[in-house]
Amino acid sequence: MAWVVTLHKKAEKQVLKMPRQAMAALYQLMLCIKENGPVRGEWPNYSKLPGNRHHCHLKKGKPTYVAVWTEDKETITVEIIYAGTHEKAPY
């Protein structure tokens, strides 16, 4: 069963400021989540955060870009709540 993956309004604005490489990685992550679910252990520096939140790195280097997402198993939805630099990530 496919998951529904959306971008939070704030994340939509953040994506526009990201470099192409990080943006492409985010869309690849979104496709991967849609097909396989929110637990993405094969992505770099993936970890499950408290609650129903997850994160992984999209682009290494300086600055490092990350994505943070939440899951809702009842409605089979995932929302990307943050996509941007590592320094401002809501861990």
Image: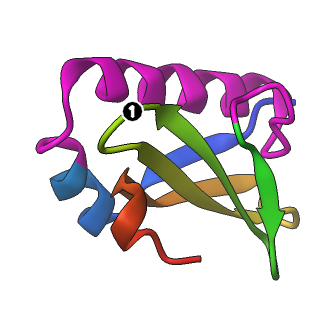
Residue 42 is left or right of residue 85, and the answer is right
| Residue range corresponding to the magenta coloring | 15-44
| Quadrant that contains the N terminus | top right
- Quarter assignment of residue 40: top right
Q: Is residue 32 found inside the magenta-colored segment of the image?
A: yes
Q: Position of residue 33 (x, y in %)?
A: 70, 33
* 27 over 84 or under it: above or below: above
Q: Main secondary structure of the magenta part?
A: helix
Q: Nearer the viewer, residue 57 or 51?
A: 57
- Residue at image location 40% in from the left, 43% down from the top: 64
Q: Position of residue 2 (x, y in %)?
A: 77, 30
Residue 67 is left or right of residue 85, and the answer is right
Mark 1 lies on residue: 61
- Residue at image location 16% in from the left, 56% down from the top: 13
Q: Nearer the viewer, residue 23 or 5?
A: 23
Q: Amino acid at mark 1?
A: Gly
| Quadrant that contains the C terminus | bottom right
